[in-house]
Amino acid sequence: MAIEQTLIIVKPDGLVKSLTGNILSRLSEAKLIIVGAKAVRVSRELASTHYEHLIDKPFFQELIDYIMGKLHGGNRVVAFVYQGENAIQRIRDIVGHTDPEKANPVSIRGAYGRITTSGVFENVVHASSSPEDAEKEIKLWFQPSELVEDIYPVKETVVKEMKTLVWA
Ligand code: UDP
Ligand code: MG
């Protein structure tokens, strides 16, 4: 069985419903290790890149608003990278089907998800669905220095005149 990584995001509805602890408890059943964790303010660019495979769907703009927190009054999500044997499928099994009404009622999405009146699935969590998606998503959401394992090749680079914030 291959060691895999997978990206988990507690979406804005999960945060508004105070489900983070509950979700982490459920995910811990998979006996994986957390190799990265952070709260993120989701920019439109980040949201659009994350969901670029859905750009032609009628619900795309609302999906972007959803992950940016515009439907829940707070622009933040919490992101995790889990690692372990068969991590992607084991996490997806606990997370459940994309459509909360088709999801197993004891899965996270089956228990806590809803469908909005406009038809978007507010399904509480994101979980990567293939090793290729996981790599793309983890590299999009995390820098190498934010992970406690070197899971993908890295290279050194010198960044000149980069504007950044430091503590005042
Ligand atoms: N989504 C939706 N309606 C659909 C398909 C997807 O609202 O018919 C939303 C839903 O929030 C889902 C996200 O778009 O989690 C990404 O879709 P994807 O097909 O990648 O599903 P996932 O991998 O999240 O199960
Ligand atoms: Mg997906």
Image: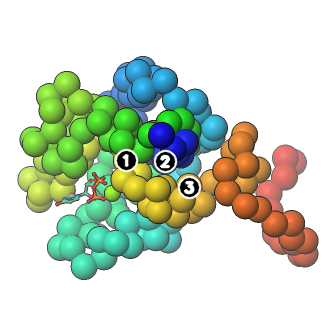
Q: Amino acid at mark 2?
A: Leu
Residue in the image at 73% along x and 49% along y: 150
Q: Is 151 drawn above or below residue 78 in the view shown?
A: below
Q: Is 55 drawn above or below residue 26 in the view shown?
A: below
Residue 61: x and y in percent read 28, 70
Residue under numbered circle 1: 126
In the shown orientation, is residue 168 left or right of residue 119?
Answer: right
Residue 80: x and y in percent read 53, 41
Q: Amino acid at mark 3?
A: Ile
Label 1, label 2: how far apart the Cα atoms are: 8 Å
Residue 163 vs residue 143, the one in the foreground = 143
- Tell me the crowding category of disc 3: few under 14, some 14 to 19, or many 20 or more residues within 10 angstroms, Cα based: many
Residue under numbered circle 2: 7
Q: Amino acid at mark 1?
A: His
Residue in the image at 33% along x and 61% along y: 65
Residue 131 vs residue 60, the one in the foreground = 131
Residue in the image at 41% along x and 21% along y: 29
Residue under numbered circle 3: 138
In the shown orientation, is residue 53 left or right of residue 30?
Answer: left
Whether residues under marks 1 and 2 lie with C-beta atoms below 8 angstroms apart, the answer is yes
